[in-house]
Amino acid sequence: MLAETRPRVYDRAVTSDAPSSDIPSLSSALEATLARLGRMIRSVGARHGLGDPEIDALMQEVRIRLWRAQSDGERISALPTSYVHRTATTAALDLIRQRRRHAEREPELYAGPPAALATTRQADERALASDLGAAIVHVLTGLGEARRVVVRLHLAGYEREEIMALLGWTDAKIRNLLSRGMQDLRDGLRRAGYTWPETR
Amino acid sequence: MNDDPRRDTQSDMTPDMTPDGLRDAYQRQVRSSASLDRRDCPSPDALQRLADESLAIKRRAVMLDHVMGCAHCAPEFALLRSVATAQLHPASTWLRRPWLSPARLAVAATLLVAVGIGGSAWQRSRTPATGPSAEQPATPAPVLRDDGSMVTLVSPTDRVAGTDLRALSWRRVDGADGYVLDVFDTTGALLLSRPTADTVAALNATEVAQLAAGGVFDWMVTARRVDGNERRSSLTRVRIVQ
């Protein structure tokens, strides 16, 4: 049953006795296309805390889709950028849908954060960071929505220009909300007992 | 917080209050507060519209407020946003933005070089002669239960001696009625593809020699479930050492 439903790409590569002459060019064209896309996705993804496994899974999905859809390297090289991006977008959406379905069926796998081994000192540091994180979230809940969302984006690693693009607000508005929101956050943390080194 | 004994007794164990420290603490908190209930989460399609900036502006703030505080939505959005950004803002577009004028870039480049030289010298002065090399980070990667890709590869997953390379193994996937093992070289060319019902694929001498010849290979396993769905492992790179 497996052999009947396997993607064409595997059949092409495996069933021929001698390597077909178009496979290297297909592979190199595919890798060149993916390298261009992958560099950009990785650079943005890293800023947003996206791990390599997530991006690797996406790139592999894109690789397989392009491989299935295009029969030779020349066609892959000629693919418009928009087509490759569209493929990446649908692949990312399908990955997310697939994981949500899986999480619904097997919720115990998604019950909490991954367990990690830690030394006592690491555990202490994490406990302190966890206290601070909880205090940050607590202070944020008391902010107005506009300030809160801008500060959340900032804390999640998004640059001001990207926050501007995501919210569709002006730079001046974002700058104002971020400045006031961060001040509110610092004030709230001070009230909770946190201090900054220069103020001690 | 002054009543927390840890802060009084351990002067060096204070939380990191720098901007990076606040970010790290916030992101950890978000990740650790994963809820099983996702009824309030936006659909993948809504997340996509948010990521590609096509969602109505008046709806974006509310949705982003949820996404940035949700352990499930944040990484999903980051993935979609990374793809969308690659399309919306290619490098040439960012470089044409007025705030990235040639004069500012020149100043930034000068500062970068200065910081790089200073930072490198500082780092050399602090790194012991027997310290880890740049290629081997001092802190090991966190031990994760699963990266979410459903099929977990067991061995090899990082480095393996050529003489120890006899089989590839992975964890059983519930409901799977078969697996397909695929091995690629670093250019993405398929070296080996094998359907199997087992979770171990023994390699013969020819296959071992083929994999060892390149020094590095990537492998993944696709599990086919009885309902027709597929689950795929992440692509894992293995280096063969002597």
Image (cartoon, rainbow, N blue to C red):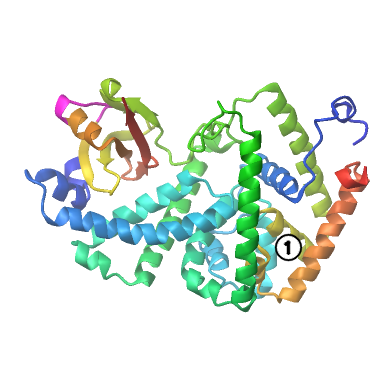
For image coordinates 61% across by 38% down, the residue present is: B124
To which residue does mark 1 refer? Answer: A150
- Density class for disc 1 (Cα within 10 Å; few <14, some 14-19, many ≥20) is many
Can the viewer see residue B39 in this picture? no
* Horizontal side, residue B206 vs residue B67: left or right: left
Q: Which chain's residue wears label 1?
A: A
Residue B30 or B22: which is nearer the viewer?
A: B22
* Horizontal side, residue B34 vs residue A137: left or right: left
For image coordinates 80% across by 70% down, the residue present is: A176
Where A168 falls versus B19 (above or below)? below
Q: Position of residue B126 (x, y in %)?
A: 66, 34
Quadrant into which the C terminus of chain B falls: top left
Residue A58 or B138: which is nearer the viewer?
A: B138
For image coordinates 42% across by 55% down, the residue present is: A94
B199 magenta-colored: yes
B29 magenta-colored: no
Where A86 falls versus A51 (above or below)? below
What is the secondary structure assignment of the residue under circle 1?
helix
Q: Position of residue B88 (x, y in %)?
A: 50, 71
Q: Position of residue B195 (x, y in %)?
A: 22, 36
Can the viewer see residue A192 in this picture? yes
For image coordinates 51% across by 60% down, the residue present is: B82
> What is the residue that sits farthest to the left in this orientation?
A17
Question: Could you tell me how many numbered marks the image carries?
Answer: 1
* Horizontal side, residue B156 vs residue B70: left or right: left
Name which residue type carries label 1: Val
Q: Position of residue B120 (x, y in %)?
A: 61, 45
Quadrant into which the N terminus of chain B falls: top right
Q: Which of the 4 image quadrants contains residue A129?
A: top right
Highlighted magenta segment, given as a residue range? B197-206
Q: Which of the 4 image quadrants contains residue A184?
A: bottom right
